[in-house]
Image (spheres, helix red, strand yellow):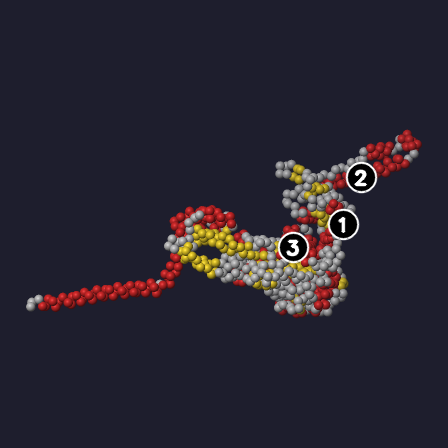
């Protein structure tokens, strides 16, 4: 009986313990459940991403950038596969510094490339665990050397690289790309989205030891291909002629634009100097600007084509009408316009006023129109607005509305001042006159396509001159002047080449027309027009009866040669002639004039050039000789280094003339002696006659008098010695007393060239006759009447 209460006490204790255990278990389950919920629900995405990074690697597969073709489907810009090097830092471990040093020793070949220095490589390895670039887009030899290092955690990946197979050809049109294939200039920038395409991806599965177990790829979508209106052959012709002239004139830069006047298509757009888009790491920022669409300059006299076209079309002026040029000077509202210092024309025809580029004549044409009407024609020719050519950074130029003009602005506008234009606007204006008065917006893009070269659906668009406007005019076209007005202007512009300031633009077998221009640049220091910094230009077309091409040439700040060599007729017209001649022959355009021999063309060009040299001072001959031959500062042919030899040559020339006169007199006296009877001669001797003449004659008969030898030019050497190189040098022949044709032939026979000044007979030459000069040297000769 006494044990009954004790049994009653044990049961509650067990139940409490059970409850405690159960509660603890439930708490543990709850904690596990919450933890699992936190990890699997809240942080699910984080762990999925972490697992993905550990078990796989995803690469972005760059698309193939679209190809840039010329109109004949010649690749101007294409994409090639190259090797890039990347690292997985987690696999390298603690050996990063040593690997960075080894890799930099192989891939850091360019001192200007800071991306591949040892410090930069090591910094990228320390900053990431799974991926770091070592070097991008290597050449095959460097890639091979990296593979030979056989470093753990270093891998090779194929990447696309932009390649320009023709180097700097049309560089400003094409542009260039950065390391990540982003367009940074030209068409590459303007159509970057279309050319770039859509990237793909590659997913690679890895095991615990980081070995590849498989991969999945999504193919990238390549970019679109662009077919341009540029003809690579015409582009090369334009660039070669422009480069030579920029070098010859020592100009800052130059631009040539060749256009089809009937469609507005740009066949060539050349800028000098250029850049090589294949070497984007060493580009000079100053050479990247596309001057054809971004450079604004005052056109000068080339703009008179707008003035005269507007006067003929809107004011009833005829080419045969008379205009008073007032002796080359005109004053209005306190401003005086002056024609060229050699032009003092009075009453002449409108055609002659344009041929001789009279500022006074052009101003009177603008006054006939009035500001508002003149402004409307300027706008009609495309000035003051963007042409919307498919190139970036195009400027609209500078053109103020008439309400903002000053009292004499109309005079300035008439002669190409107070207005800023681009070379593309200039060539489009000339094309408007050439095609019959219809403005055609310029463009460089023919089509965008997915087809590649070789696909039968993609066909070349070789340029064949049509000589007429298309049946359906494109957007942006508009009539500016009447067809009859355009025909009159073409005839007047031909007169500029035949009789006026553009004689050096004459072609062989083709008629040509155009207008010269020389604009003074603004001096930043004085904010006034500079008389030494000029922009020389020429804009024209050929042939005149059926224009096939229009060309604009702009040479900025030519400095070599005399003052006349800086004008549009001397600096830019020859470039037009060279490019037009080659392009017309290349296109197979039929000749419309008789062909001339090479000698006839040379004489014609020299006669045209001499008109620009009339005002050269005699003391400038030596400077001109040094300039046209680009003599270095220490060249012995420069003055005064050559002065001694030149003086000796002058003395030798005088002695030679005296000897020749003495010889002629002796021969005359010998002839007289021979004709005398023997008895008379005997009496002469017996009576102490003049035996001196007879004795001299006898001496001449036995041995002719020798003329003093001309001192040859020598070359100085660094050790003080001098040498004469007769094998590679020729003696300068004497041109004195010769006409232009004989001087040209004499120089040509000696292997030399001729730079004439003036007209008439040769009176002075540099260097003097007998001077030893290299073959091909240009001799400067002054002709006077």
Give residue 286's quadrant in the image.
Answer: bottom right
- Foreground mark, 2 or 3? 3
Q: Nearer the viewer, residue 294 or 81?
A: 81
Which secondary structure lies at badge 3?
helix
Which secondary structure lies at badge 1?
helix
Q: Earlier in the sequence, mark 3 or mark 1?
A: 3
Q: Position of residue 183 (x, y in %)?
A: 53, 59
Q: Which residue is mark 2?
A: 660
Crowd around label 1: few <14 · some 14–19 · many ≥20 (10 Å): many
Vertical arrangement, residue 139 with respect to residue 35, above or below:
above
- Foreground mark, 3 or 1? 3
In the rendered image, the residue lying farthest to the right is 679
Vertical arrangement, residue 243 with respect to residue 10, above or below:
above
The label on residue 325 is none
Vertical arrangement, residue 207 with respect to residue 406, above or below:
above
In the rendered image, the residue lying farthest to the left is 1
Q: Earlier in the sequence, mark 2 or mark 3?
A: 3
Give residue 484's quadrant in the image.
Answer: bottom right
Left or right of 264? Residue 216 is: left
Is residue 598 among the parts visible in the rendering?
yes
Which secondary structure lies at badge 2?
helix
The label on residue 237 is 3
Q: Earlier in the sequence, mark 1 or mark 2?
A: 2
Q: Position of residue 753 (x, y in %)?
A: 71, 47
In the rendered image, the residue lying farthest to the top is 686
Left or right of 475? Residue 180 is: left
The label on residue 740 is 1
Is residue 406 among the parts visible in the rendering?
no
Tally of marks = 3
């Amino acid at each position: 009986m006494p044990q009954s209460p004790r049994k009653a006490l044990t049961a509650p204790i067990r139940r409490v313990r059970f409850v405690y255990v159960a509660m603890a278990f439930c708490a543990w389950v709850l904690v596990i459940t919450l933890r699992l919920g936190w990890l699997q629900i809240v942080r699910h995405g984080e762990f999925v991403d972490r697992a993905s990074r550990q078990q796989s690697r995803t690469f972005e597969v760059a698309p193939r950038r679209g190809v840039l073709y010329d109109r004949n489907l010649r690749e101007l810009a294409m994409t090639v596969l190259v090797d890039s090097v990347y690292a997985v830092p987690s696999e390298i471990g603690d050996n990063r510094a040593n690997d960075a040093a080894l890799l930099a020793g192989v891939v850091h070949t360019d001192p200007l490339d800071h991306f591949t220095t040892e410090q930069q490589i090591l910094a990228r390895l320390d900053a990431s665990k799974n991926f770091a670039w070592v070097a991008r887009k290597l050449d095959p030899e460097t890639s091979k050397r990296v593979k030979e290092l056989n470093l753990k955690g270093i891998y090779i990946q194929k990447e696309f690289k932009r390649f320009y197979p023709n180097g700097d050809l049309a560089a400003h049109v094409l542009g260039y790309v950065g390391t990540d294939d982003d367009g940074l200039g030209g068409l590459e920038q303007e159509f970057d989205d279309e050319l770039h395409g859509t990237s793909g991806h590659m997913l690679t599965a890895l095991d615990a030891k980081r070995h590849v177990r498989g991969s999945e790829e999504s193919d990238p979508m390549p970019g679109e291909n662009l077919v341009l209106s540029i003809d690579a052959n015409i582009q090369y012709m334009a660039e070669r002629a422009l480069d030579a002239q920029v070098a010859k004139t020592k100009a800052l830069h130059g631009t040539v634009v060749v256009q089809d006047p009937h469609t507005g298509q740009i066949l060539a757009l050349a800028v000098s100097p250029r850049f090589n888009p294949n070497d984007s790491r060493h580009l000079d920022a100053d050479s990247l600007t596309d001057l054809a669409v971004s450079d604004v300059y005052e056109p000068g006299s080339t703009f008179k084509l707008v003035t005269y076209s507007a006067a003929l079309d809107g004011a009833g002026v005829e080419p045969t009408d008379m205009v008073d040029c007032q002796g080359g000077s005109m004053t209005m509202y306190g401003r005086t316009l002056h024609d060229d210092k050699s032009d003092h024309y009075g009453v002449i025809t409108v055609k002659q006023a344009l041929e001789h580029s009279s500022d006074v004549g052009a101003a009177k044409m603008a006054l006939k129109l009035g500001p508002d009407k003149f402004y409307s024609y300027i706008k009609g020719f495309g000035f003051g607005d963007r042409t919307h050519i498919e190139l970036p950074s195009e400027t609209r130029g500078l053109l103020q509305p008439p309400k903002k003009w000053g009292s004499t602005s109309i005079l300035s506008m008439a002669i190409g001042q107070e207005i800023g234009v681009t070379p593309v606007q200039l060539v489009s204006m000339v094309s408007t006159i050439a095609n019959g008065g219809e403005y055609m917006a310029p463009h460089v893009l023919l089509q965008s396509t997915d087809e590649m070269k070789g696909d039968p659906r993609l066909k070349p668009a070789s340029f064949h001159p049509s000589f007429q406007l298309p049946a359906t005019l494109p957007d942006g076209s508009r009539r500016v002047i009447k067809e009859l007005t355009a025909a009159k202007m073409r005839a007047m512009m031909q007169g500029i080449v035949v009789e006026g300031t553009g004689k050096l633009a004459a072609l062989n077998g083709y008629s040509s027309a155009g207008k010269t221009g020389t604009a003074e640049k603004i001096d930043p220091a004085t904010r006034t027009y500079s008389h030494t910094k000029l922009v020389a230009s020429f804009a024209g077309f050929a042939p005149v009866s059926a224009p096939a091409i229009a060309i604009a040439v702009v040479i900025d700040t030519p400095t070599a040669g005399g003052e006349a060599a800086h004008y549009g007729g001397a600096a830019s017209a020859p470039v037009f002639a060279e490019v037009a001649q080659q392009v017309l022959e290349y296109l197979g355009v039929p000749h419309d004039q008789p062909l001339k021999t090479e000698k006839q063309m040379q004489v014609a060009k020299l006669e045209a050039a001499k008109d620009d040299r009339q005002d050269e001072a005699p003391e400038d001959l030596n400077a001109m000789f040094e300039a046209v031959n680009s003599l270095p500062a220490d060249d012995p042919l420069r003055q005064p280094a050559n002065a001694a030899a030149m003086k000796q040559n002058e003395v030798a020339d005088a002695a030679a003339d005296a000897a020749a006169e003495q010889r002629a007199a002796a021969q005359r006296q010998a002839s007289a002696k021979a004709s005398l009877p023997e008895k008379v001669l005997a009496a002469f001797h017996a009576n102490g006659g003049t035996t001196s003449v007879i004795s001299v004659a006898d001496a001449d008969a036995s041995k002719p008098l020798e003329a003093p030898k001309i001192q040859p030019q020598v070359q100085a050497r660094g050790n003080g010695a001098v040498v004469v190189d007769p094998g590679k040098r020729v003696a300068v022949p004497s041109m004195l007393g010769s006409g232009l044709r004989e001087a040209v032939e004499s120089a040509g026979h000696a292997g030399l060239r001729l730079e004439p000044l003036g007209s008439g007979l040769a009176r002075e030459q540099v260097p003097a006759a007998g001077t030893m000069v290299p073959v091909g040297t240009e001799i400067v000769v002054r002709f006077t009447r």
